[in-house]
Amino acid sequence: MRRFLWASYGMYLLAGSISVLFGSIMPELVVYYHTTYTTGGLLILSQSIGFIAGVLLTVNLMKKYHHKAILSGSALVVFVAQAGLLIWPPIYLLFPLMIVNGVGVSMIETAVASYIMELFAGRRAVVMSRLEVAFGLGALGMPVIASGLIAMGGWRFSSGPLAAFALTLSILWIAMSVESEVSHHEGYSDARTAAPPAFSSRVALYQLMAFFLVLIFIYVGVEGSLNSFLPTIFTIYVNTKPYFATLSTTVFWIAMVVGRMAIGWIVHRISYERYLLGSFLLSVLFFLLLAQFHTSMWSYVIVGGLGFSMSAIYSVTMVYANHTFPGRERFVTSAVTGFAGMGMAVFPAVIGYAVSHLLPWQVLWLLLGFAIIMLAIFFAIEGNLRIIRKRTTY
């Protein structure tokens, strides 16, 4: 299965690169089209709409087609969108291209994660953490490529490497033969977690699932908001020069990647629920510290700690949800991915409004509030699981 895994890492590397592409070239795009950042925000929203639609499409396709066809097709959809962006058509044509782009990225994340949940039971968190590392490397590397092209006056070719990579992956999936048997004992396995509950009613099942989905919705929204507005917060709240403020996002993502690289070792020793409890507690602590400190040096250190503490919340929560609802891997993974897409679309708009209308310290306290809500939802999940398990023992 090594070929399957490496090709999957490549898919997540592609998805991570695409996630930051437009943020990297947005100032040049606005000037080129003589438009505003509001239009740029609508383009990002279009991609989010495509992302949500892509989840529904992928769920239906997985019922009918082999995984190689779906994975190859998803990379091909991304290739079409990125190739279309190379010619930078009239701006009204950018919106459908962004929707197609979102559909392709969504198909990649939904399909790859679903198959990982099915094929690697027993070490899902280990494998998902490596996928998230690949995603983070893409998110770190794309701005570097884009900045180099901008410096050379060739920012319009930023999507070229992504188009070529997507086409290569599409061909690779079709040509690759993947073993049907999976060795569950190959490499690290996840630490033992409490056995899945036996649900006595659909109400209890869907109530618990709703907690997981709301948790993912808020988490991805907060992470996306940090990606978009950390430099602004540093510029206004910490009084950092704009060119230094942009480093806050870099520090955050470096810490995220380092944290994700460590998760394969951590979840081999710590159960899902203990890892998540520690992550949510540390996130609340670092958001609180960020709201208190105004000095540049300490703020960068705190952002690094925040990135490390949040690094694998998404992947471990997805794995924990799949562990809690065995036999429903495709439904759970697609639902988690869909709610992640909604959080990615809604929260940046909410936090963007807050940045425009509230004081910087109020924005940070708002983010702290969301971190506390996530911790409360996690406690609600654990409380529900204890109640369900007690009922089934009598």
Image: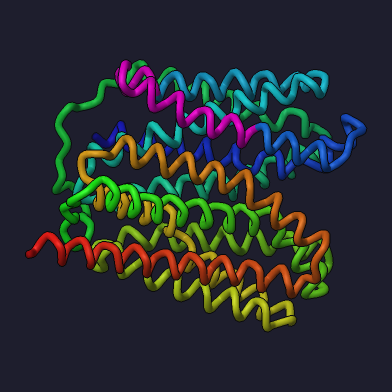
Query: Does the stretch in magenta take in 205?
Result: no
Q: In what quadrant of the picture does the C terminus appear?
A: bottom left
Q: Is residue 66 above or below residue 134?
A: above
Instruction: Name the foreground residue: 362 vs 190.
Output: 362
Residue 117, by quadrant, is top left
What predominant SS class does the magenta segment belong to? Answer: helix
Residue at (54% x, 65% y) in the render: 307
Instruction: Name the foreground residue: 33 vs 277.
Output: 277
Residue 78 on image: x %, y %: 56, 25
Whether residue 360 appears in this view of the structure is yes
Whether residue 124 appears in this view of the structure is no
Q: In what quadrant of the picture does the N terminus appear?
A: top left
In this rendering, position of residue 213 left or right of residue 140? left
Residue at (52% x, 71% y) in the render: 372
Q: Is residue 55 above or below residue 314?
A: above
In this rendering, position of residue 286 left or right of residue 37? left
Residue 206 on image: x %, y %: 33, 47
What span is in magenta?
47-70
In this rendering, position of residue 292 left or right of residue 213? right
Instruction: Name the foreground residue: 252 vs 387.
Output: 387
In this rendering, position of residue 185 left or right of residue 270? left
Residue 328 on image: x %, y %: 26, 39
Q: Is residue 235 above or below residue 105?
A: below
Residue 299, by quadrant, is bottom right
Residue 50 on image: x %, y %: 59, 29
Q: Is residue 301 above or below residue 182?
A: below
Residue at (29% x, 49% y) in the render: 203
Residue at (69% x, 79% y) in the render: 297
